[in-house]
Image: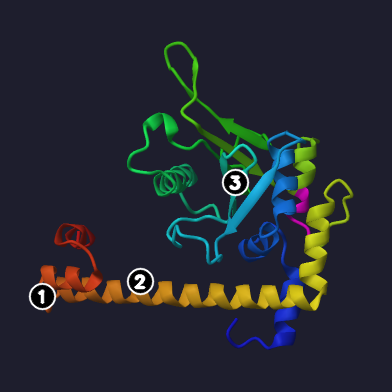
């Protein structure tokens, strides 16, 4: 993207869909859009979203290692992290667990009792059926194996996908996530935001800025990975002591040693 002209970027913007990370981040930076999405998925037409923090926001205190496409605060104070995922090359369940734990810890105070630990939804939207059970939406519950009693620990995990169409309004919403333009009148806020991002000067500026930020983050990640690989090779070749290589990588000697196996 670094060699794209402004006009080429504008053409690229036309091709984006809501399921694409960059475009969803821009879409979700609008409370009304997140509210419309969550009202459908959580099947609560009265649900209120009071605040949204997106990945690139200056208010995002969680860091890029914690994937927060859109962290919403609902009217009752419950947090809801919306994530979109196109690639099926990760352990999605552990990713949800990690991000939810990170938000929980960050938003808790040391003196809080466990009763006060925040309740949280995770809505994970994917371009594939994670569980391969032929459903558009899955609600993951914790149960007692022996009695099938559902246990509520305050974390609610909901997985939605664009692959399976079960004829519901949720499936209609998921179909919108695959479109370059949305004309479904059931989702006016998403349609309006998409149109603004793709056809107005202000929308183009938002998208171009996001594209540049993603490129810079990708470069930084690549440089970090390259540096780590180099340190591993130097340690393996005996050019650097493991302790020295670990220090340069910002890791403990024990952590670095695991990479040499």
Label 1 and label 3: CA atoms lie apart by: 51 Å
User: Which residue carries the number 1 mark?
Assistant: 238
- Rendering coords of residue 249 (x, y %): 24, 70
Q: Is residue 82 above or below residue 113?
A: below
- Indicate the secondary structure of the residue bearing disc 3: strand
For image coordinates 61% across by 37% down, the residue present is 76
- Visible in this render: residue 180? no
Q: Which residues are magenta?
A: 175-179
Tag of residue 73: 3
User: Do the CB atoms of the residues marked 3 and 2 lie less than 8 Å apart?
Assistant: no
Can residue 41 be found in the magenta stretch?
A: no
Tag of residue 130: none
Tag of residue 225: 2
Nearest to the observer: residue 65 or residue 178: 65
Nearest to the observer: residue 176 or residue 100: 100
For image coordinates 34% across by 76% down, the residue present is 226
| Residue 160 appears left or right of 199 | left
Mark 3 or mark 2: whose residue is earlier in sequence: 3
Residue 87: quarter of image = bottom right
- Rendering coords of residue 245 (x, y %): 17, 72
């Amino acid at each position: 993207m670094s060699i794209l002209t402004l006009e080429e970027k504008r053409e690229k913007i036309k091709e984006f869909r809501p399921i694409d990370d960059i475009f969803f981040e821009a879409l979700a930076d609008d409370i009304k859009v997140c509210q419309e999405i969550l009202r459908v998925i959580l099947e609560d037409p009265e649900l209120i979203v009071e605040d949204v923090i997106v990945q690139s926001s200056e208010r995002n205190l969680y860091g890029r290692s914690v994937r927060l496409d859109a962290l919403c605060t609902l009217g009752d104070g419950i947090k809801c992290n919306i994530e979109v995922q196109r690639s099926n090359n990760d352990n999605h369940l552990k990713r949800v667990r990690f991000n939810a734990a990170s938000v929980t810890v960050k938003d808790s105070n040391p003196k809080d009792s466990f009763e006060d630990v925040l309740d949280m939804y995770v809505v994970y939207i994917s371009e594939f059926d994670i569980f391969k059970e032929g459903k558009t939406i899955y609600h993951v519950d914790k149960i007692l194996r022996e009695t099938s009693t559902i246990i509520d620990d305050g974390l609610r995990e909901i997985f939605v996908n664009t692959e399976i169409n079960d004829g519901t309004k949720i499936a209609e919403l998921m179909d919108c996530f695959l479109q370059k333009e949305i004309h479904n009148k059931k989702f006016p806020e998403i349609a309006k935001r998409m149109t603004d991002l793709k056809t107005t000067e202000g929308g183009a500026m938002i998208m171009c800025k996001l594209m540049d930020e993603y490129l810079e983050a990708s470069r930084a990640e690549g440089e970090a990975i390259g540096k780590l690989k180099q340190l591993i090779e130097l340690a393996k070749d005996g050019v650097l002591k493991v302790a020295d290589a670990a220090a340069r990588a910002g890791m403990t000697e024990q952590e670095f040693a695991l990479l040499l196996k």
